[in-house]
């Protein structure tokens, strides 16, 4: 008798796809009792009147974040500034090949002002590298503080210009050959110019007067 063909073996079950790790959840917490003292120690808020700092304390939101959480993401809309009360965050920016780390921020630092003073978009990603607590201050609160205390607005814009230059010289590939000392020197020599739409910056054939 001819041998009977072997019966097909049942297919082995495919292993289950691993579930993606859960993203750390943001938790809103009560404003700490020493929040006003913390704000007074931060250079941005140091010169505010006591009443303005009390108002700021009453209107800000306090968030508790775990390591791995992304507080702001590059390209997203932005409507608030953040202060690091505790913990640490890193600031990164996209490049054609991966990301570049611009800074690590510790308690007393703040971030998020680019979106408030420029185009309402986040210009970098800020992620938590050590569990912490963060003060979230809305655009409306910042606007009210600037209106009541114009010097606060001047201080904020000065920080913004400094950080804009820092982001430029650390993220643009053009500046990669420079060491840190050369970047610092360049930042002190660059100047901002507000140019109306339609203005000719460079005209072919004319002598060059600078690098833009």
Image (spheres, helix red, strand yellow):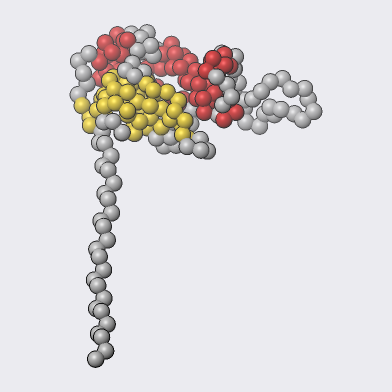
Q: Looking at the picture, how far across and down is residue 21, in whole percent?
A: 27, 43
Residue occupying the point 35% across, 25% down: 89
Residue occupying the point 71% across, 27% down: 202
Residue occupying the point 37% across, 32% down: 72
Q: Quadrant of the C terminus?
A: top right
From the viewer's perspective, is 16 left or right of 73?
A: left
Residue occupying the point 52% across, 28% down: 171
Q: Quadrant of the N terminus?
A: bottom left
Q: Is residue 202 visible?
A: yes
Residue 183, quarter of picture = top right
Q: Looking at the picture, how far across and down is residue 79, in whole percent?
A: 38, 30
In the image, residue 103 above or below residue 36? below
Residue 64, quarter of picture = top left
Extreme-right residue of the structure: 205
Extreme-bottom residue of the structure: 1
From the viewer's perspective, is 129 left or right of 119?
A: left
Q: Return the residue nearer the eye: 85 or 53.
A: 85
């Amino acid at each position: 008798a001819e041998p009977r063909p072997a019966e097909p073996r049942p297919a082995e079950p495919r292993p289950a796809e691993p579930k993606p790790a859960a993203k750390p959840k943001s938790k809103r917490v009560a404003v700490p009792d020493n929040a006003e003292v913390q704000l007074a120690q931060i250079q941005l808020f140091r010169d505010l009147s006591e009443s303005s700092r009390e108002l700021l304390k009453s209107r800000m939101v306090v968030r508790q974040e775990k390591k791995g959480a992304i507080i702001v993401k590059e390209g997203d809309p932005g409507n608030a500034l953040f202060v690091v009360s505790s913990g640490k965050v890193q600031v990164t920016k996209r490049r054609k090949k991966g990301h570049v780390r611009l800074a690590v921020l510790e308690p007393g630092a703040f971030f998020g002002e680019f979106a408030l003073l420029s185009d309402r978009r986040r210009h970098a990603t800020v992620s938590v590298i050590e569990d912490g607590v963060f003060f979230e201050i809305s655009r409306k609160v910042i606007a009210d503080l600037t209106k009541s205390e114009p010097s606060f607005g001047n201080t904020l814009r000065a920080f913004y210009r400094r950080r804009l230059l820092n982001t430029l010289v650390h993220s643009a590939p053009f500046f990669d050959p420079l060491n840190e000392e050369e970047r610092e020197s360049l930042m002190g020599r660059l100047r901002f110019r507000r140019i109306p739409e339609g203005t000719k910056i460079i005209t072919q054939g004319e002598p060059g007067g600078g690098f833009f």
